Image (cartoon, rainbow, N blue to C red):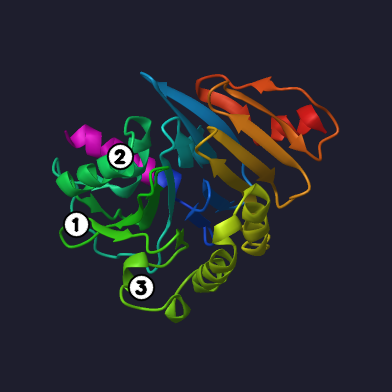
């Protein structure tokens, strides 16, 4: 058991030795359901993965971590073939005194990984109620979960239980401060890291939720981009759970969009690229690097 927790702690150190500062995610329930996410991190390799677990296929955006001579890719946002979405992002301020890991609780990133097997947000919630999420040494995270049936909430570590903050109205937004801190408040009262993006997203979605589509999703993500050269927006994604597709813009270039199919395990240019044709994505941890896609289609 001690070995298990040592591995988890090592994983955490490797995953978040340098933290992201500006990720933004949302779920919006219009005539259709759409999810969105900006991944903001230092310029390191990212890849797109498709994992298979029985009859559930899950797409993940993963980013490279390094410790010594060892490198691997860590998942941070994704959607499965049941239309269940999740985004795992940094939460500020950091919890300097997290509880000890036991067999009865789970780390926040472990709840994110549940999209590999769960079919709905309700299943996620039951898991988080049975095994409360806890913060981790050196990094504090929270997760947004949403499904195509209208359930969406954030999950954050509480004392002692998981705190779920449910969607109100037609959409939900998560940046880098606690969604639970907004209970009973107007979105304009948001304070903390990412409050500006939270307010901007609320105002955009209030205006456009009724006619939301992929183009409007990228318009919002472009407005929320981080241009800090140390932690720029590396990848922007709009998820369509009805079609099982993910639309992807790399490095803030919203004139070029890729389209990933979960069903076919392929990725292809959707608009703006010079070349056409679909590329297969190997199932499992191999995936396909964003840099290779740029070389393939430009």
Q: Is residue 288 visible?
A: yes
Judge the density around disc 3: few (<14), some (14-19), many (≥20) Cα neighbours within 10 Å: some
Query: Residue extending furthest right?
Result: 274
Q: CA distance from mark 2 to mark 1?
A: 15 Å
Q: Nearer the viewer, residue 177 or 16?
A: 177
Quarter of the C terminus within the rendering? top right
Q: Which residue is mark 1?
A: 99
Quarter of the N terminus within the rendering? top left
Q: Which residue is mark 3?
A: 182
Give the mark nearest the N terminus, 2 or 1: 2
CB contact under 8 Å: marks 3 and 2: no
Q: Which residue is mark 2?
A: 8
Q: Position of residue 271 (x, y in %)?
A: 77, 39
Give the mark nearest the N terminus, 3 or 1: 1
- Relative to 30, does residue 64 appear above or below in the rendering? above
Judge the density around disc 1: few (<14), some (14-19), many (≥20) Cα neighbours within 10 Å: some
Label 1 secondary element? loop
- The magenta stretch is 1-12
Q: Is residue 228 visible?
A: no
- Relative to 241, does residue 153 appear above or below in the rendering? below
Task: Indicate whether residue 165 is drawn in magenta.
Answer: no
Which residue is drawn at the image coordinates 28% and 47% (left, top)?
A: 107
Image disc number at residue 3:
none
């Amino acid at each position: 058991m001690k070995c298990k927790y040592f591995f988890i702690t090592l994983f955490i150190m490797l995953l978040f030795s340098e933290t992201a500062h500006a990720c933004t995610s949302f779920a919006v329930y219009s005539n259709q359901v759409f999810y969105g996410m900006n991944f903001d991190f230092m310029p390191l390799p990212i890849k797109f993965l498709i994992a298979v677990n029985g009859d559930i296929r899950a797409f993940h955006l993963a980013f490279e971590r390094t410790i010594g001579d060892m490198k691997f890719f860590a998942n941070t946002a994704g959607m499965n073939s049941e239309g269940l979405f999740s985004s795992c992002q940094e939460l500020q301020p950091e919890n300097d005194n997290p509880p000890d890991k036991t067999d009865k609780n789970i780390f926040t990133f472990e709840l994110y990984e549940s999209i590999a097997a769960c079919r709905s947000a309700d299943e996620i919630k039951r898991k988080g109620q049975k095994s409360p999420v806890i913060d981790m040494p050196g990094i504090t995270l929270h997760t947004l979960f949403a499904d195509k049936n209208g359930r969406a909430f954030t999950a954050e570590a509480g004392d002692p239980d998981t705190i779920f903050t449910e969607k109100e109205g037609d959409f939900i937004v998560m940046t880098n401060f606690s969604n639970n801190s907004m209970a009973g408040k107007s979105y304009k009262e948001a304070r903390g890291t990412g409050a500006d993006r939270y307010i901007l997203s609320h105002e955009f979605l209030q205006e456009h939720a009724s006619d939301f589509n992929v183009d409007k999703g990228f318009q919002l993500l472009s407005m929320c981009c981080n241009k800090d050269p140390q932690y720029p927006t590396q990848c922007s994604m709009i998820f369509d759970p009805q079609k099982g597709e993910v639309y992807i813009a790399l490095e803030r270039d919203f004139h070029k969009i890729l389209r990933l199919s979960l069903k076919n395990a392929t990725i292809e240019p959707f608009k703006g690229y010079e070349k056409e044709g679909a590329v297969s994505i190997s199932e499992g941890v191999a995936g396909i690097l964003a840099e290779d896609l740029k070389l393939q289609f430009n």
